[in-house]
Amino acid sequence: MFDGERAHALDAAAAGLGVRPGMRRGGVAALAPGARMAERDLAAERAALEAAARAALRFTPRVEQAGDGCTLSLDVGASLALFGGPRALGRQALAAVRALGLRARLGMAPTAAGARLLACRAGPGVRRRTLRPGTLARQLDRLSCALLPQALPHLEWLDGIGCRELGQLRRLPRAGLQRRCGPALLPALDAAYGRAAEGGAPYVPPPRFAARIELPERSDHGEAVFRQAQRLLARLCDWLDARQLAATRLAFALEHGRGRHAGPPTRLDLALSRSAWLAAHFEAPLRERLSRTVLQAPVAAVALDVRDLSARPALSAALFPDPASMREDHARLLDLLRARLGAEAVAHAAPRADHRPEIANGWHAGPPQRRPPAAAPGAERPCWLLAEPLPLAVRGDRPVHGSPLRLLRGPERIECGWWDRPWTLRDYFVAEDERAVRYWIYRERDARPVRWFLHGLFG
Amino acid sequence: MSAASALPHPALWRASQLATRAGPCLGTGHGRLDAELPGGGWPAGALVELLLAEPGVGEMRLLGPALARLPGDGPIALLQPPCPPHIAAWAAWGLDPARLLWVRPGRPADALWAAEQILRHGSCAALLYWQAHARHAWLRRLHLAARASGMPFFMLRPAREADAPSPAPLRLALSPAPGGVRVALIKRRGPVCVQPFVVPLEPGRGTRPARLPHAPVDRPAPALPEPGRLAPALAG
């Protein structure tokens, strides 16, 4: 990774070949001919740090972004009991950052500056956590001066006088140090050792959420796209948590890259029937939607926007499942079914006040409608209504469906109003064939010769 | 001391007895059928297979009373029914039509997925699932999902699947009969039921219209025990 002309960050394989931060491009190319060089993306780094800060807000309201652009400080003193102690909290914090697709190193100390210095300690098996000020001072004494950002401009001079560790720096005469190194070094040192107050502005999440993430490489594989969308959802849920909001509609845009040949982004609207704020509630419908979506071109980036926000409803902490939580569960099931099968595949009854059965028997994709059906009370109705009435053959004046039908009950006359179209004049009968299967059939009254139709099964 | 008290475990029963069911059962509303089913009704939380000679033989009128007396007001899911459900018929059974949920998946794989999701969420009062062909592994998976959810789960399949093995603890073959439906118990936890019996579906009405010139010949035959087998008696 290059920041301008100088190497900024590198992986273990490059370090093994002798590449060091600060080298020029030519030097790196000579040492590691096969290295992949990438330009540093400051905007992406800022976005990643902001996402991590939002994730950290679930542990404490006091999160600060340090000036160096890669460190977060969390004041967790008041949260230790809630999260089960410092060790458990540290584990959860690392897991939260990992869910965003980032990596972090965790330092823990009674002072924020001390924790930051401990976290900078590289290498496996190094102690980075301490809870006692005495231990912290002993640990800090052994750290290199180069870890303190304020000491960096004076590093050569400090090195020249044999002052390599913070402990040695601390023992130098304060007045002389202040004169030579300026006013910034001493307060930073004191803050790390807990001798001066620390203070900074806590992080406040922005009022609007919009996030975009680029795939490592363009992919038309649904699962790879879903993984990136999952990271966006993790960010969204952290933001919702921080602002105590719930979302109903999410708009995903799958971008197919820039350039002449790239088509417009594929839009994916995820509408839930109930507002949700947990990642799992968005993930299941999103996975089904993505598996149903046909990608026209490989996806280069995924962007997420939130459309409908609402205040989060208060949760009731009941021991037994109550009807409200059952309804929540059911709404979630309907969302899931709609996401995979399509909105029109999940239908509720919407009966219409009409005498014609095919009109009265209305189904729609929205929520169920409570309106009494117009059927006459006591009238015998079949359980299934054929989508299209089936014309029946007539043999010897009797309708035939497999075998001649015998009319059991009827006629029941059903007509439409004179203003209605299509024209409907029917006599309905309950009929039975030779094996005693029941049918609901009708005869068209205005047709010559007589025409019979099968309209329903008694099931 | 009766024979049943010597077998205290509910999973054990004598070959001549119907098993007692530990879980909840849903009365079928047909006394003749209740007497033949272990536990005295449709078992909840198990796969129940109804094998139909053809759609419309009377399966819904057989299930109707049980569905109408389902506890709670949860929705009743109809997954992949053969025809559009007729709302007026359900209302006539005393069922609130707002409880009906009609799910029409496009492909059989989607239908299986939907059935599993409905069972896993457990927010519906019952699931009725029409499926022409189903592999044994799928059935087993659905049966386990139903057992975990405790939801009444009926699977309606064609009669030609009767010979295929199935993990369902209760399998009924239905065929049309005058005035009712002929039920053959293919599988139950209890003695083999050799003789199909007719469950009348129209109480109070004659099985034949009075216009017929002759008296009804075929009467519902009792389920006679096979020679050498004892008549089913309820255990416990």
Image (cartoon, coloured by chain):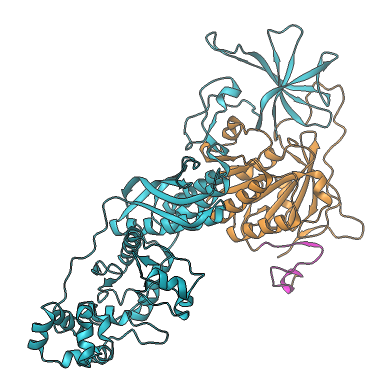
Task: Name the spot of residue B208 as percent of width and height, x first.
Answer: 79, 28
- Where, quadrant-wise, is the C terminus of chain A in this rendering? top right
Instruction: Please say whether residue B73 is visible from this viewpoint.
Output: no
Q: Is residue A191 left or right of residue B124?
A: left
Q: Position of residue A53 (x, y in %)?
A: 31, 64
Q: Which chain is orange?
A: B
Identify the image quadrant of residue B7.
bottom right
Near-viewer residue (A27 or B24): A27
User: Quadrant of residue B151 in the image?
Assistant: bottom right
A241 falls in the magenta region = no
Q: Residue at x 56, y 52 (%)?
A: A222
- Of A121 and A91, which appears nearest the observer? A121
Q: Which residues are magenta?
A: B3-21
Picture layout, residue A324 above or below residue A107: above
Of the pair A168 and A134, the residue shown nearer to us: A168
- Magenta: main secondary structure equals loop
Vertical comparison of A245 with A346: above or below: below
Residue B220 x %, y %: 82, 40
Chain coloured cyan here: A
